[in-house]
Amino acid sequence: MSRDLLEKFAPLIAEREKLKAFEPDPLEVTMEQVLSPTEAIVNGRRTILAGTNNYMAMTFDPDAIAAAREALERFGTGTTGSRILNGTYVLHRRLEETLA
């Protein structure tokens, strides 16, 4: 009575195929230019970013950008793997402690 592992995903795959018919594909939106925390150019048109997590505009904050540059210079772009295999950074631990 076992089903193929992927068989249970067939309805989801069918729905995804239907969405691909729309232009632009709602699951493949590409921002050509970010104008502000809530607007970008998508398919050549100014578009409201209703689903953004950037509601506090931190991606454009000069202090956040400077801190990100400093962290990149010191730590690189990442551990290149999961915490269990590659460990973590002291900055991650500090953030976790601050948030706790």
Image (tube, rainbow, N blue to C red):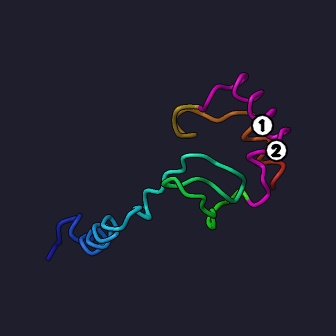
In magenta stretch: residue 61: yes
Contact (CB < 8 A) between labels 1 and 2? yes
Tell me how many marks there are.
2
Question: Is residue 88 depicted above or below 48 in this figure?
Answer: above
Question: Is residue 41 depicted above or below 65 in this figure?
Answer: below
Residue type of the residue flagged with mark 1: Ile
Where residue 66 sits in the image (x, y, percent)?
81, 32
Q: Residues within 10 Å of mark 2 (few under 14, many from 20)?
A: few
Residue 8, by quadrant, is bottom left
Image quadrant for the C terminus?
Answer: bottom right
Question: Is residue 93 depicted above or below 30 in this figure?
Answer: above
Where residue 7 sits in the image (x, y, percent)?
21, 69
In what element is the residue under mark 2? loop
Q: Residue at x 23, y 64 (%)?
A: 6
Residue 78, by quadrant, is top right
Q: Magenta part of the protein: which range?
A: 55-78
Residue type of the residue flagged with mark 2: Asp
**Residue at numbered disc 1:** 65
Residue 74, by quadrant, is top right
Q: Residue at x 54, y 50 (%)?
A: 31
Relative side of 24 to 44, left or right? left
Relative side of 74 to 42, left or right? right
Q: Residues within 10 Å of mark 1 (few under 14, many from 20)?
A: few
Q: Residue at x 83, y 39 (%)?
A: 62
Relative side of 38 to 33, left or right? right
Per the picture, the main secondary structure of the magenta-coloured stretch is helix
**Residue at numbered disc 2:** 61
In what element is the residue under mark 1? helix
Pick whichever, 99 or 74, lies toward us. Answer: 74
In magenta stretch: residue 100: no
Pick whichever, 80 or 20, lies toward us. Answer: 20
Where residue 57 sits in the image (x, y, percent)?
78, 53
